Image: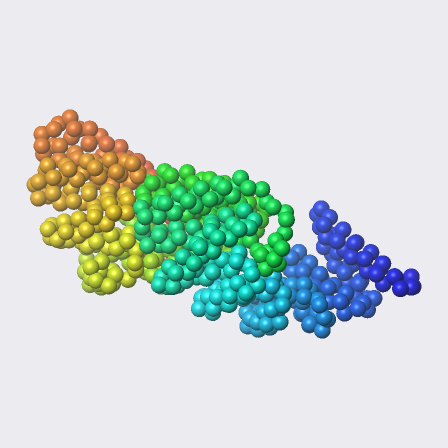
Amino acid sequence: MATGAEAPESWYLALLGFAEHFRTSSPPKIRLCVHCLQAVLQFKPSQRVEARTHLQLGSVLYHHTKNSDLARSHLEKAWCISQQVPQFEDVKFEAASLLSELYCQQNLVDSAKPLLRKAIQISQQTPYWHCRLLFQLAQLHTLEKDLVSACDLLGVGAEYARVVGSEYTRALFLLSKGMLLLMERKLQEVHPLLTLCGQIVENWQGNPIQKESLRVFFLVLQVTHYLDAGQVKSVKPCLKQLQQCIQTISTLHDDEILPSNPADLFHWLPKEHMCVLVYLVTVMHSMQAGYLEKAQKYTDKALMQLEKLKMLDCSPILSSFQVILLEHIIMCRLVTGHKATALQEISQVCQLCQQSPRLFSNHAAQLHTLLGLYCISVNCMDNAEAQFTTALRLTSHQELWTFIVTNLASVYIREGNRHQELYSLLERINPDHNFPVSSHCLRAAAFYIRGLLSFFQGRYNEAKRFLRETLKMSNAEDLNRLTACSLVLLGHIFYVLGNHRESNNMVVPAMQLASKIPDMSVQLWSSALLKDLNKACGNTIDAHEAAQMHQNFSQQLLQDHIAACSLPEHNLISWTDGPPPVQIQAQNGPTTSLASLL
């Protein structure tokens, strides 16, 4: 071995060069890379070199192999040795960050938390790492559903960023806190926080892409807040701003100049992820408003973009975006009379959830809710009840809980013999008194359910009162589907009462709106009423035309019903426990009643 003062540096640089060459080869030669790094340790190097080498070994093993125990051992050594070396912040805090990530992957959360807390405590003179470690610990608490601790840490981060003169990162901390407060439904705290964020974002003068990405984050929170509240019309100006903002970002070139303040070295999301997110909130809006063809168009665009991104990027957020998009488009398909496609997409969500326990944990209730809605569409009411009951057991989300209860109530109304259970549910979603959520849309739907029940019980004046309330609320916020459903039900009531003129005044706009959405069930119902109305009024030609329309809608729905029930995925309606079934056995044709469609 060579001797002299420069020998250690030359052998070290040579081994490091070989290791990097093997790591970046195509394909990477990870085993050879690890051998080179392990060889460095054979030379009994200085503590600085030893700590850095353990970090490099831990990082390579963690990112490129399944040997997580060996990776953990190297990272623990890197963290331990680096604390004894002065001015060695990058190695020390990178080791802490990576090691805590690995602990979480191995379900050793109780080891990750104290490690991050200590790293945060000793990193106050290093703004970038202090902020990054605060974000990391806040994210860990969020994943554990401890949103209070996460919010506290984000508040600490915002104050620290202010002190070190980073208004950009202060805004990131505050917007992240706002997102968690929205998840907790702490609306009293959200409003002043978002107002402050808006001021910081507008006043900050810096990198244009960073500024616009802050605006996207801010506007996404505002839009989702409106949509959670069921305010589909009120959200339009914010949504338009958001769409303009993402167009601006897509025209800007990434600036390679690094910020002068190290605390500013953060990005909220990559540009491409932001584009998908804006598509996603646009789909959410279109579905709630009843613009289902628009929802379909944006879903197709978003899913195409996601497929391209997933080829290069395995970030878990992309799978979350994909599942949420599919959840919304499945609901659209059930409305537009494409049950077979909806069922195949439900199966696709199951497959995505099989690949990630965390994804399944976050979406299990939604998955059973979608199966419940599918069961209603194919008239499998017992299965619908079982799916909704399972979903209620799995959710703690108030809006989703209210949505499920509303749909379960509709199942009990159709069954006609579940009075005790029905009244118990209706007490919990009384739109006139202590409604459980602030959602305008869900409260309007609760009035509709009351109107539907009163109609079936023959209490027509009471039904009209509830349905007029639904109409008033749905018109105020452009809730097209609820408007169409209320109009056709009011038309049916006036028809039963013999008021044919008033009935016609309700059914014709219901049919027009249902065609625009398009809502196949309301079109079927409206055409049946128009046929009977025109027949009663002696309008033979119009009656014949309405009868032909009704026949066409019936045939389309019947064919789709048979196609859906013949699919092997139809067996998913029996799944109510545990993870999604891996294989779905085919069955011999449909086993469900078609009477509800005829």
Q: Is residue 167 visible?
A: yes
Q: Is 533 on the left-hand or right-hand side of 145?
A: left
Quadrant housing residue 541:
top left
In the image, 371 versus 592, the foreground residue is: 371
Give the x, y percent position of residue 114: 57, 73
Q: Is 251 on the left-hand or right-hand side of 336?
A: right
Q: Residue at x 9, y 29 (%)?
A: 538
* Number of marks: 0
Give the x, y percent position of residue 380: 29, 50
Q: Furthest-top residue in view?
A: 541
Give the x, y percent position of residue 165: 56, 61
Q: Residue at x 39, y 60 (%)?
A: 192
Give the x, y percent position of residue 233: 31, 46
Quadrant housing residue 103:
bottom right
Q: Residue at x 33, y 58 (%)?
A: 399
- Where does the N terminus fall, quadrant-wise? bottom right
Q: Is 46 on the left-hand or right-hand side of 220?
A: right
- Where does the C terminus fall, quadrant-wise? top left
